[in-house]
């Protein structure tokens, strides 16, 4: 299952869906939002946006790449958009495989590929402004903007 | 003259002050030519140029690839999903 979701991700249901008699291993990677702090400010929440349907297509492509590389029985990748509060899941990857090696490796591969090719962006909303992660463009006073 | 629909995301939308615009082209143009016209419309995008990627109709494209009237071009800052 590959999905961009505006609502909270039902992590338990996603993992339960991966259990299968042919598979002896289920590995998951769950990315959660981290509330960074600086001397005078802290992250209040993160906000994600995605270019759809390209982002949906890229998640599916990552699933296809995994099936070409490893013997897996089930792959799910779900990514949030919109506001995600600190400590909440922003991305959930679940891989079931007959054996544990491919399950571990494929779930790692999925998150690295998302960070490279999925057209998804996050904005950290700090107590003193915001910043687009990766571009370092925003409104924070301490930020050095591109001019 | 016909239009290409241009979508902007993340920091690029911020810098341009809009999430969507139209860029007029004659028949077929390269993505590089379209970028020049877009940069004239939104000069605040220019300093980001080296960091940007582009998509045409939902797939990553290079500056020498062509765009036609009716195509959808997306301006993609460095992705930061996860």
Image: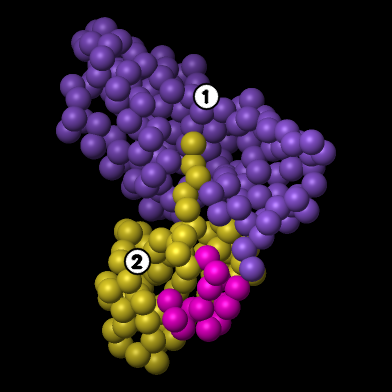
Residue B46 colored in magenta in the image: yes
**In the rendered image of this protein, does residue A107 appear above or below residue A22?**
below
The disc at residue B73 is none
Work out which quarter of the rendered image holds the C terminus of chain A and state it. bottom right
Shade representing chain A:
purple
Residue A56: in sight, yes or no?
no
| Residue B9 percent across, percent down from the top left | 53, 59
Shade representing chain B:
yellow
Number of other residues with Cα within 10 Å of mark 2, as a class: few under 14, some 14 to 19, many 20 or more = many
- Residue at image point 18% right, 30% down: A69
| Residue A123 percent across, percent down from the top left | 62, 47
Q: Which residue is mark 2?
A: B56
Residue A122: in sight, yes or no?
yes
Q: Which residues are magenta?
A: B35-48
Q: Which residue is mark 1?
A: A10
Number of other residues with Cα within 10 Å of mark 1, as a class: few under 14, some 14 to 19, many 20 or more = few
Q: CA distance from mark 1 to mark 2?
A: 33 Å
């Amino acid at each position: 299952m590959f999905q961009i979701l505006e609502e909270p991700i039902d992590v338990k249901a996603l993992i339960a869906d991966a259990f299968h008699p042919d598979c002896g291993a289920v590995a998951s990677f769950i990315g959660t939002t981290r509330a960074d702090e600086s001397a005078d400010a802290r992250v209040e929440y993160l906000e994600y946006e995605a270019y759809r349907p390209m982002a949906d297509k890229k998640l599916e492509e990552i699933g296809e790449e995994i099936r070409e590389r490893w013997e897996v029985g089930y792959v799910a990748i779900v990514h949030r958009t919109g506001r995600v509060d600190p400590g909440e899941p922003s991305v959930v990857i679940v891989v079931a495989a007959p054996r544990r090696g491919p399950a571990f490796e494929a779930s790692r591969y999925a998150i690295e590929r998302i960070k490279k090719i999925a057209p998804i962006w996050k904005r950290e909303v700090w107590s003193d402004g915001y910043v687009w992660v990766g571009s370092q463009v925003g409104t924070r006073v301490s930020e050095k903007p591109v001019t | 003259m016909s239009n290409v629909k241009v979508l902007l995301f993340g920091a690029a939308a911020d810098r341009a002050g809009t999430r969507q615009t139209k860029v007029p082209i004659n028949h077929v143009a390269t993505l590089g030519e379209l970028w020049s016209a877009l940069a004239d419309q939104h000069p605040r995008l220019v300093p980001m140029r080296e960091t940007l990627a582009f998509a045409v109709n939902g797939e990553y494209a290079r500056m020498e690839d062509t765009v036609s009237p009716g195509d959808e071009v997306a301006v993609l800052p460095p992705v930061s999903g996860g």
